[in-house]
Structures are given as structure tokens and as C-alpha cells.
Image (cartoon, rainbow, N blue to C red):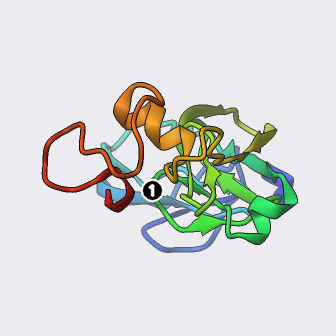
Amino acid sequence: VQNGGAGWAADGGAWHTGGDTLYTLAQGAHTISFRSVDAILTPTNVMVSLTNGVFTTITVTYVPYGHLIVTLDPEQARDAGAQWIVDGYEAVTSGVEVILTPGTHWVQYSAVAGWVAPTSEVVTITSGGQLNFPRSYAPDVDTDRDGVPDNWEWTYLGGMNFTEADDPDQDGVINLLE
């Protein structure tokens, strides 16, 4: 990254490139900071304590960010508001690239009326890598025509043996209103 603008400075002074040696620093504590570079994770500041006559070397690594793109289908679900969310932050529309630090990230999918969202998942982003994956929303159908979507019946009732007027959990609220 040396030629890409990376550099370091001691105590907020002039910028230097990797491999430079600075002989003018006094004995004592100093802060080494690093210049940021687009699409690269900048190293955190390093505190050093210099002693007269002792040569100190600092090695840091600039790590390229990774990229994540999720494409949501079908178009009707996107038109109804389907989006994806990384690590609980802001919702993102289908096909938008998100730049992330390398490592694991939690991906969730927004609830959309009339659609069953994909299952939330953990993804691993590699340094400098790009992860593209499609995910599909499924129509939330009512095959037994009882007024309660099949997905809700299976998730909350364990099957499709109840109607919209039933109250199997006996909480005083019928299925249609839950």
C-alpha cells in the first residue's frame, strides 16, 4: 500500500512512507499514527516509548476491506420493500455493495407483508474479497384457505390444523388477530 498513499507520522508531524527512519525524536513516549487509504482498514495508533541508543521498529499491516452484495428475489418482493441488514445497522436494498471489515457479520432480512423472508445468517468476509449471493423471498401463501398464511401456521402452530377462528394457545386472541 506504500504507493497507494499509506504513511505514518510521529506525534502528528510530517508524513513518512514505509521503511523511513526518523532520527530526530527525543527519548520518551510518542504516538505513531497512520494515514488512511481508500478501501483499506487503517491501523490503529501505536504508542512507543523511546530510549536513547535503542533502535525501535514498528510493523503494522493495512488490511483491505471486503465487499458484500446480496441480491434479493423475486422482483415482487423487492417492490414490496424487501431489504437486507448487516450487523443490525441500516437496511440496504437489493444489489447494493456494502464495504465491511474482514471477519464474520450477521445478515438479516426485512419482514415484508405477504412474503416469507430468507433465514438470517452469518457470513464471513475476507480481506480484499467480494461475496455475492442471491437470496429469495417466498410468497406467504394460504393453501388451506383458512385466512392464516401457511408459514405462520407452521412457525407458531406446528402445522395447518387450525383455522383463523381458533385459539390453540388459549391466550384469548384468535389466530387471525395474532
Q: What x and y, as percent, mark residue 150?
A: 55, 39
Image quadrant where residue 119 sits: top right
Q: Residue furthest top?
A: 158
Q: Is residue 96 visible?
A: no
The residue drawn where x is 66% and y is 46% is 141
Question: Regarding mark 1 in the picture, which secondary structure is present there?
Answer: loop
Quarter placement of the C terminus: bottom left
Q: Position of residue 31 (x, y in %)?
A: 38, 59
What residue would you read off at disc 1?
A: 88
Residue 164, percent from left and from top: 40, 51
| Residue occupying image coordinates x 48% and y 62% | 89
Left or right: where does residue 17 sit relative to residue 142? Answer: right
Q: How many marks?
A: 1
Q: Is residue 35 left or right of residue 177?
A: right
Percent x, y for residue 2? 79, 51
> Crowding at label 1, few (<14), some or many (≥20) Cα neighbours within 10 Å?
few
Q: Which residue is drawn at the image coordinates 42% and 68% (left, top)?
A: 11
**Left or right: 39 as drawn, with respect to 143:** right
Name the residue nearer the viewer: 89 or 99.
89
| Side (left or right) of 149 relative to 5 | left
| Residue name at image x 39 percent, y 25 percent | 158
Residue type (three-letter) at the residue carrying disc 1: Gly
Residue 44 in sight here: yes
Given residues 89 and 149, the one toward you in this image is 149
Residue that protrudes farthest toward the bottom in the picture = 13
